[in-house]
Every structure is written in structure tokens, then in C-alpha cells.
Image: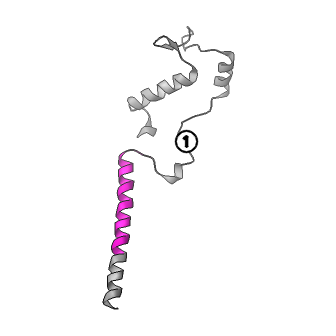
């Protein structure tokens, strides 16, 4: 081989190694930050926007916002919460308390 061919090969190998290092560093940083970058799970919304069950849907149609004790509608700071808002509140609390594995 010639000196020019050897230099070109060295530059190509160094460039490929640098590109691989950058890709692995970005992937490691994303994993460290808890980002889900696995392409196998991109079709899964991981629980965000879960459709309501038939029972929940019919309860919403009836306008029933009763809490589990059968009292009045659940309230936060004097504001009546819907089932969806209650789910959102519970999801946030689960994340804060570390009960939601999807947030890890």
C-alpha cells in the first residue's frame, strides 16, 4: 500500500470510531436521564392517554363524579375534579413518590 492509501484508511477508521463514540455517548446520556429511546417501544404510548373503560365512560355520561365513599364529587382547592383529572393527579403523585415504574 502507498502512504496516501494508508493515511486515508487511518482517517476513515478514526472517523468511524469517532461517530460510534458520539452515538454511544448520546445513547448513554439519554439512558442516564431516563429517556426511553428504545425503538421497539415507540408504538406504545406507555399509558399516556389510556382510553376510558366502558364503566368509566358510562359514569361520565351519567355525570357521576362521586368519590369512593359515596359522598359528593371529589374536590381539590374547592374545584370539582373529573375522573380524568383524578387519574392525572394520581399519576403525578405516583411519579413523585416513585411508585410508577414507567418514569424510571
**Residue 26 is inside the magenta segment:** yes
Compare residues 37 and 12 and report the one nearer the observer. 12
Compare residues 70 and 83 and report the one nearer the observer. 83
Q: Residue at x 62, y 33 (%)?
A: 51
| Quadrant showing the N terminus | bottom left
Q: Residue furthest front?
A: 4
Q: Position of residue 70 (x, y in %)?
A: 57, 10
Q: Residue at x 43, y 38 (%)?
A: 103
Q: Position of residue 80 (x, y in %)?
A: 54, 14
SS class, disc 1: loop
Which region shows up in magenta? 13-35
Q: Which residue, given by chain and number where applicable, does mark 1 sit on? A: 45
Categorize mark 1 by other alpha carbons within 10 Å: few (<14), some (14-19), many (20+). few
**Residue 18 is inside the magenta segment:** yes
Compare residues 104 and 63 and report the one nearer the observer. 63
Q: Which color scheme does this rendered protein use?
A: one colour
Q: Is residue 55 above or below residue 50?
A: above
Q: Residue at x 33, y 87 (%)?
A: 4
Q: Residue furthest bottom?
A: 1
Q: Position of residue 59 (x, y in %)?
A: 65, 19
Asked where in the image residue 69 lies, by quadrant, the reply is top right
Q: Is residue 90 above or below residue 41?
A: above
Amino acid at each position: 500500500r502507498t502512504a496516501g492509501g494508508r493515511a486515508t484508511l487511518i482517517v476513515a477508521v478514526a472517523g468511524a470510531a469517532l461517530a460510534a463514540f458520539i452515538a454511544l455517548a448520546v445513547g448513554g446520556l439519554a439512558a442516564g436521564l431516563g429517556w426511553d429511546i428504545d425503538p421497539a417501544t415507540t408504538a406504545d404510548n406507555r399509558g399516556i392517554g389510556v382510553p376510558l373503560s366502558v364503566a368509566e365512560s358510562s359514569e361520565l355520561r351519567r355525570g357521576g363524579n362521586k368519590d369512593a365513599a359515596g359522598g359528593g364529587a371529589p374536590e381539590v382547592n374547592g374545584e370539582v375534579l373529573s375522573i380524568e383529572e383524578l387519574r392525572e393527579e394520581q399519576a403525578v403523585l405516583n411519579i413523585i413518590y416513585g411508585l410508577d415504574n414507567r418514569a424510571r
